[in-house]
Image (cartoon, rainbow, N blue to C red):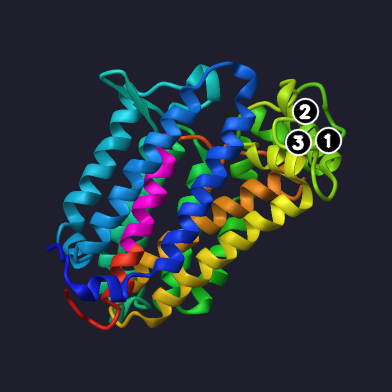
Amino acid sequence: MFSFRKNFIKKFDFVLFITVLLLCVYGLVMIMSATASYENSRFIKVQGITVILGIVAIILLAMMDYKLLGKIYLPIYIFCNLLLIAVLIFGTGDDDWGARSWLSIGGFTFQPAELVKLGLIISLAQFIDKNKNSINEPFVLLKTLLFAAIPIGLILLQPDFGTAAVFIFFVLAMLFAAGLKLKYFGYAIAIGIISLPAIWFSLDKYQKNRIFNFLNPEHDTSGSGYQAKQSLIAIGSGKVFGRGLFKGVQTQFGYIPEKQTDLIFAVIGEELGLMGGLVLILLYFIMFYRLVRIAKNTKDTFGSLMVIGITSMMFIHIWENIGMTIGLMPITGIPLPFISYGGTFLLVNMIGIGIALSVGMRKEGLNF
């Protein structure tokens, strides 16, 4: 199951591994700056410990044959759905974030949906692999969509539309990579357009306000549009080279809400400027290049689809998070991979990298 042979070092993608480490260090530095005014080191300690745990997880998963995950995909899938049901019954977060998305077990609080993202990617990849030759048959496609829809539906019941949108994106990406015909995507777009009125009326007031604020940034800058406005002010004031670490006015004086999590890119823009943002995007580009390379060169459908799902999951997070801080997307509670504070979120992303490394090392069907 695990391997320590010389081929491990030879096949290990050090470029991807080091890039992820650099992203984690970048995140630690920005969290340190974002929380400097709190006079509380808890954030940096939690994130630092999670980075160490994540590194261990990456190495262990890289040594493990990823095909083991395919053999237990049903238990993984069932466990994920049970977690989401537990959130609906015992979860917290309604009052603070407008969605019941968190579980507390023995003093440890986490967001199960983050774990479920990875669980669904693994189980859906295996489910598609088992039906890859008939994925375009209506009945098989319907089974596949139902398989993916159950956890997404449970997340919508929290309700957490932002997280559900992430799930929908990587599910569609995996189906596209599996060879699903374009006509089905056309049907999906048509259904989505027809459903817009129903979706609109199902939204809570604060969710509608976010859309209003996106369409008109000056709609309510002291209320529901406060986050977006302060983010734009921070990024604009950073200019090319930024105000300097620990010197951001919007950051250090607390004008940016959720500055260590959802709006951490605004902290980067203010304190490190355009250059700091470009360095981060370059690191992401290298990471995506290595992940896509693994997915493309992997002969095994299950392994390739897992990497595509992991890559798509991270991509939509980055697109939405950076987009909402610069006014190109509505404000949602979507964190930035490896940069935002959040133990569960960071660990899940690092586990995803470990799985991708395992697939990359065995892309030609080799075992070590």
- Residue at (20%, 80%) from the top-left corner? 366
Q: Would you name the residue on which mark 3 appears?
A: 231
Mark 3 vs 2, N-terminal side? 3
Q: Residue 69 carries which label?
A: none
Q: Distance between the residues labelled 1 and 3?
A: 5 Å
Q: In this view, does 67 lie above or below 203?
A: below
Q: Would you name the residue on which mark 1 appears?
A: 233
What amino acid type is highlighted by mark number 3? Ser
- Residue at (25%, 19%) from the top-left corner? 106
Tell me if I can see residue 171 in this picture: no
Q: How far apart are marks 3 and 2 (CA)?
A: 8 Å
Q: Would you name the residue on which mark 2 appears?
A: 250
Along the viewing direction, whichever of 166 and 157 lies nearer the viewer: 166
| Residue 298 falls inside the magenta stretch | no
Q: How far apart are marks 2 and 1 (CA)?
A: 8 Å
Indicate the quadrant where residue 87 lies.
top left
Magenta stretch: dominant SS?
A: helix
Rendered location of residue 232, percent (x, y): 80, 39
What amino acid type is highlighted by mark number 2? Gln
What amino acid type is highlighted by mark number 1? Ile
Q: Is mark 1 in CB contact (under 8 Å) with mark 3?
A: yes
Q: Quadrant of the N terminus?
A: bottom left
Question: Which one is in front in this view, the residue at disc 3 or the one at disc 2?
Answer: 2
Point out the stretch of residues depicted in magenta.
Answer: 343-355
